[in-house]
Amino acid sequence: MQYKWIALSNTTLGVLMATINGTITIISLPAIFRGIGINPLAPSSFQYLLWILMGYNVVTATLLLSFGRLSDMYGRVRLYNLGFLVFTVGSILLSLTFGTGDMAGLELVIFRVIQGIGGAFLMANSAAILTDVFPVNERGRALGINQVAALAGSLIGLILGGILSVINWRYVFLVSVPVGVFGTVWSYLKLRETSAKNREGIDWIGNAVFGTGLILVLISMTYALMPYGSAQTGWGNPYVIGSLIAGLGLLALFPFLETRVKYPMFRMELFRIRLFTAANFAGFLRSIGYGGLMIMIVIFLQGIWLPLHGYSYSETPFWAGIYTIPLMIGFVSAGPVSGWLSDKYGSRGLATAGMIIVGLGFLALSTLPYDFSYPVFGAIIFMMGVGNGMFASPNTSSIMSSVPAKHRGAASGMRSTLQNTGQTVSIAIFFTIVILSLSSSLGPSLAHALTQAGAPQLSPYVQKVPVTGALFAAFLGYDPVKALLGTLPPSVASQIPASAISIMEQRTWFPSAIAPSFMLALRETFYFGAILSFVAAAASVLRGKAKISEEVVQYNAEKTRR
C-alpha cells in the first residue's frame, strides 16, 4: 500500500474519533446531566453546560498555533501520535467521572480539557500530514475523504448518543476508547515523518500573549452568558468587561509583536498570499455564522418539538439524532465530490456557492413555525449540509496548498485556530442572542400560558424564573414551573384550581408555553447566521480565479521575504 493511503487512513480515523465525540456529547447532554444529578435551576448549573460545550474548543483554539509550530520543529507525526494518546486518556477519564452534582460537573469540564489538548495535537497536524504526502492535484480528494469521515463520525455520534444515553451515560464517553486505542497503536506503528524539521526557536512571548488574550476573550464571552445581578446576562459584569478589553488588547498587540520577533509562531507573511488570507477569512466567518447552529437545533428538538409530538424525554436524544441526519447526509454527499472538483477547477466557485446555499438555508429556517412540518425542516438542513460540503474541503485544500512546505504545520495550526475560535465565539453569540431575546419575551409567554391554564395569579412568580434556567431545564426535560408550585406561599397555592394544576403538570405544557418565544429567539440567530454566510461567500470570491500551484506560491513567498 502506498504510504499516502496509510496516512489518509490514520488521519481519517482521528477525525472519525473526534467527530463521534463531538456530536455524541451534544446529543447526550440531558442524560449526562441527569446522570450526575445537576439541578438546572441552580444559579451555577448553566456554566457546566457552557463549559462542556465550549471548554474543548477554548483549549484547542488556544493551543493549536503553538502545537502547529512545535510540529514544524519536532515532527508532525510525533505530535500527532501523542494527540491520539492524550485524547484516548481523556475519554477514559470522562467515562470514569467519580462525583455527583457540581463536583461531577467540574470533573467533566476538566476531563474535556484533557481531551481538548489531545484534539489540538490531532487538528494541528492532520491536514499538514496529508498535504505532505499527497500531490497538489489529489489533495482536494484526500481532504474530501477526511470531511466524509468527519460527517460519518458526526452521524455515528448522533445515533450512538441516542442509544447509549438511554442505557448508561458513561458509555457515551467510553465508546471513543476502542477507536482511540486502535488509532494510537496504528499511528505509532505505521506513520513516519516525511517533512523536513524546522529547528527554529519557539516564540515564547508570542505564545504567552496570544494564548492569554484568546483565553481572556473566550472566558469573558462564556461568563457573559451567565446572569449577573438582576440582568439575564453578564455583559454588565465588570470582570467580564475587564477580561474582554484586556483579551482584545493582547490580541490586537499580537500581530505587531509577531513582525518583530525572530521566530514568530504566527507567520504573518503568509497573509501576503491572497488565497491563504481570503480562504482563512471565509472559513473564520463561516465558523462564527454556523458553529452554534447544531446545539440550537438539538436544544429545540429535545426541549420543545419532540415532546410536543409525543416523544418521552428519555427518547428525545435518540430521535434528535435521527432527525438531524439530513444535515450530515447533505455534507457527506457533497464533500468528496467538491474535493474532487476543486482539484480540477479550483476552489473559488465551489466554496462561494456553498456559503450562498448555507445562507439561503438559514433564511429558510427563519420562516418555519415552532410546530413545523418535519419534511420541510429536513429538506432545509439537507440543503445546508450540501452547502457546507461544497465549502469545507475545497477551502481547506486551497489554504494548505497555498503555503510553502516548511510552514504547513504553522498554516494548519493557524487555519484550525481560526476555525475553532470561530466555533466557540459562535456558540457564545448564539446563546447571547437567544438569552437576550428570551429575557423580554419569555415572561409574557409563560404568563399567557398560565392565564390560559386558569392560574393567572402565578404570573408574577414566573417572572423570577431565569432565562438560562428555563433554557437549561427545557433541554433536560425539566419543568421549572412544577418546581415553582412547591415553593409558593400557602395563601397563593390554595387559590390555584385543581384543573389548572392538572393542565400545568402535563408533559407538553411547558414546551408549549415557551415554544413561541424560543422560536422567535431562534429566528434572530438564523438571521445572524445568514448574514455571516453571505459575507463569507463574498470573502471567498476574493481568493482569486486561479488555483495557485505550490511551486509558484513558494517562489512568491521567497521573493517577498527578500
Image (cartoon, helix red, strand yellow):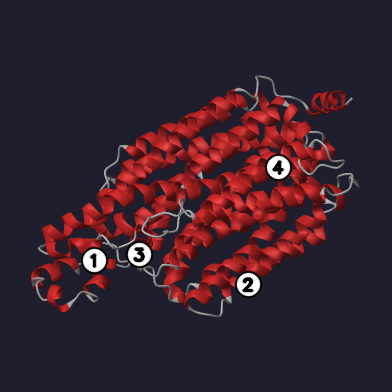
Q: Examine the rendered structure and indicate whether residue 502 appears above or below residue 383.
A: below
Residue 92 is marked as 2
Q: Are marks 1 and 3 in contact (CB under 8 Å)?
A: no
Residue 1 visible here:
no
Residue 419 visible here:
yes
Which amino acid type is marked by label 1?
Arg
The x, y position of residue 91, in whole percent, is: 62, 68
Residue 473 is marked as 3
- Disc 4 or 3, which lies upstream in sequence? 4
Estimate the spatial distance between the alpha carbons at disc 4 and disc 3, rounded to whole Å: 37 Å
Estimate the spatial distance between the alpha carbons at disc 2 and disc 3, rounded to whole Å: 28 Å
Which of 127 and 47 lies nearest the eye of the viewer? 47
- Disc 1 or 4, which lies upstream in sequence? 4
Residue 507 is marked as 1
Which amino acid type is marked by label 2?
Ile
Q: Examine the rendered structure and indicate whether residue 77 appears above or below residue 260.
A: below
